Amino acid sequence: MNYLDFFELTQEPFSNAPVSRFYYGSAQHAQALMRLSHCVASMKGLALLVGDIGAGKTTLARRMLDSLPEAEYEAALLVIIHSGITAQWLLKRIALQLGVENPADEKLALLSQLYQRLVRIHEQGKKAVVLIDEAQMLATREIMEEFRGLLNLEVPERKLLSFVFFGLPELEENLKLDPPLAQRVALRYRLEPLSEEATDAYVRHRLRLAGAPRVPFTAGGISAIHALSRGTPRLINTLCDNALFEGFLARARDLDERLVERIGRELGLEPARPEGPPTGAGTRDGRLDLEEIDAFLDSLTK
């Protein structure tokens, strides 16, 4: 027997692999997907989604790729695995992803091939879209200039290619390496950590899809998971997976906050500390009165 048998699960519910079946469409993930989809449907050029480590960017990128109808889009997902890539490598890889056969080594010839392929895609009534995951790895001015050039490929009144960048927040700084490209960002969206309510729904969602007949986590256990993970999906998965395994070893059907907090300590996680009331000059017992607030606001307009 393993923990799947013990908790009557048909598969691992908390794997950190990007399994599309377990996609959880939180309110903000749904908003992000809707806005990004509108951006590529309108061929606005460049859209940007950023979030901290483990926020679910890769999962959202794969979800978006799966959601684009093949009859309407020529879409591809390119994952950047290191920062040492060259602009030439990137250009050739994009060409291959969009269906260019035998891409040329010489840049002008390659651009001509890509342009001709994009025109054919356009004539077929489809839109060309490339999703770039781990886009913060694109950290040179040369590469940013290459993207700007690709966004210039167009026919009258219509761009031929759209990009969506998924990456860590430092991606915003990388874009500034080429200010004209930064000005072409048509949409920016940032994934924030899940709330405690969304964390609870996320855990229940994955357990249900894995066949769980009941939720083994107590209310206190869920609160501890949220506090220790700070609402980061990847850490939620790690905590829940460990809790299920430890519960199996202890033959515990109910997974409470004590178990989760012990696992958190073993993983080196600490709960977020609640912010205290403001202190210092201009406060009484850490509280500002209404007159002081009004005076501060007035000072901002002078």
Image (tube, rainbow, N blue to C red):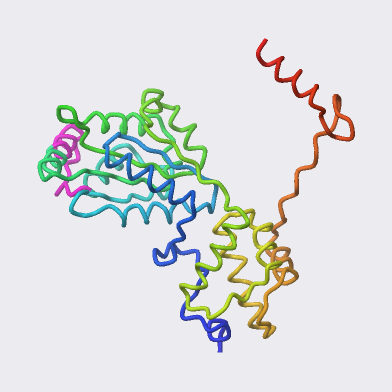
Q: Is residue 13 left or right of residue 287?
A: left
Between 216 and 155, the one lying in front of the other is 216
On the image, the x and y values in percent for residue 2 come to 56, 85
Q: Is residue 161 left or right of residue 294?
A: left
Is residue 93 covered in magenta? Answer: no
Q: From the viewer's perspective, is residue 103 above or below residue 62?
A: above
Between 215 and 234, the one lying in front of the other is 215
Please give the range of residues in magenta: 98-115
On the image, the x and y values in percent for residue 209 come to 46, 72
Between 228 and 266, the one lying in front of the other is 228
The answer to which quarter of the image holds residue 262 is bottom right
The residue furthest front is 290
Q: Is residue 234 left or right of residue 189?
A: right
Residue at the image point whose x is 49% and y is 73% from the top? 208
Residue at the image point whose x is 44% and y is 47% from the top? 31
Residue at the image point whose x is 21% and y is 43% from the top? 127
In the picture, which quadrant includes the C terminus?
A: top right
In the picture, which quadrant includes the N terminus?
A: bottom right
Residue at the image point whose x is 18% and y is 49% from the top? 99
Q: From the viewer's perspective, is residue 197 above or below residue 294?
A: below
